[in-house]
Image (tube, helix red, strand yellow):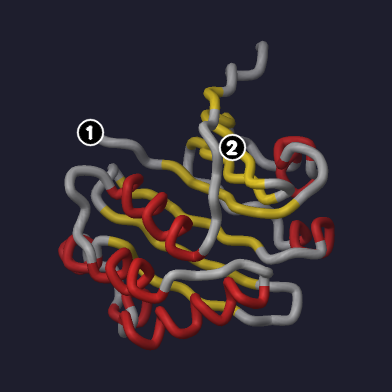
Amino acid sequence: MGFSGSFIVARASRPLTELAAMRALDYVPLWWARDGEWQILQACPVTDPDPSIIRETRASVLVAHVVDSDFATVQAVSPDGQSWQCALSPEMARDYGLPGEWIGNSAEVGERAAAWARGAGLQPDPVALRTALVAECAPLAEDLVFALVHALGFRFREGFGLAPPAV
C-alpha cells in the first residue's frame, strides 16, 4: 500500500501550516520545502485547502492528490481565474475509474498549465511538462508530482520532514 495524501503548492510569506485556510483542516503535515515564497507541503490524509487560500495568499495554488502512490489528480487555480486540472499516470487513473474529463488531453492541459505557470511568474519547460503529463508512475505517483512542479518552473530546495503535532 502506497501513499495517499496531498501536496499543496502556494506562495506565502509565512509557512503554509500557519495560514487560516490550512489551520481549519484536519490533516497531518508530513514534509515541507520552499522556493522563495513558494512552498510545497505534503499532508495526509487527502485534503483540500479552503478556497479562501487564494484570497489569503493573493497567489496561485496547486493541489495534487495522490492515491495509493498509483496516480494523482491535480487542480490549479489563480486569483484571476485561470485554472486547469489533470491526472498524472493517466492509464492508471483510468484503471481506477477516474472520468476522462479529469484526465484530459495532455496537449491542451499542457498549454493551460504553462499559461497558469507564466501567470504565476514561473518559467515552465514545455517539453518536461508534456513528459510529466503523459508519464506513468514508475514506481511512485509522488515522483510525477515533483516532475510536474519542476516542469512548471518551481525549484523547491531540499525539504524536511515535519513532526506530527503533539496530542
If the image is split into quadrants, where does the N terminus sit? top left
Identify which amino acid the numbered label 1 is placed on: Met
Residue assigned mark 1? 1
Percent across and percent down for residue 91 are: 17, 67
Which residue is located at x 44 percent, y 42 percent? Answer: 5
Q: Which mark is residue 33?
A: 2
Percent across and percent down for residue 92 are: 18, 60
Would you say 70 lies left or right of 31 here? left
Residue 89: quadrant of the picture: bottom left
The number of numbered discs placed on residues in the rendered structure image is: 2
Q: Which mark is residue 81?
A: none
Percent across and percent down for residue 36 are: 70, 46
Percent across and percent down for residue 125 are: 43, 70
Q: Residues within 10 Å of mark 1 (few under 14, many from 20)?
A: few
Which residue is located at x 58 percent, y 22 percent? Answer: 162
If the image is split into quadrants, where does the C terminus sit? top right
> Is 44 located above or below residue 50 in the figure?
above
Identify which residue, 34 or 30, lies in the foreground.
Answer: 34
Most distant residue in the bottom direction: 108
> Is 146 located above or below residue 26 in the figure?
below
Image marks 1 and 2: residues in contact by CB distance under 8 Å: no
Identify which residue, 127 or 71, lies in the foreground.
Answer: 127
Per the image, label 1 sits on a secondary structure element best described as loop
Which residue is located at x 32 percent, y 74 percent? Answer: 130
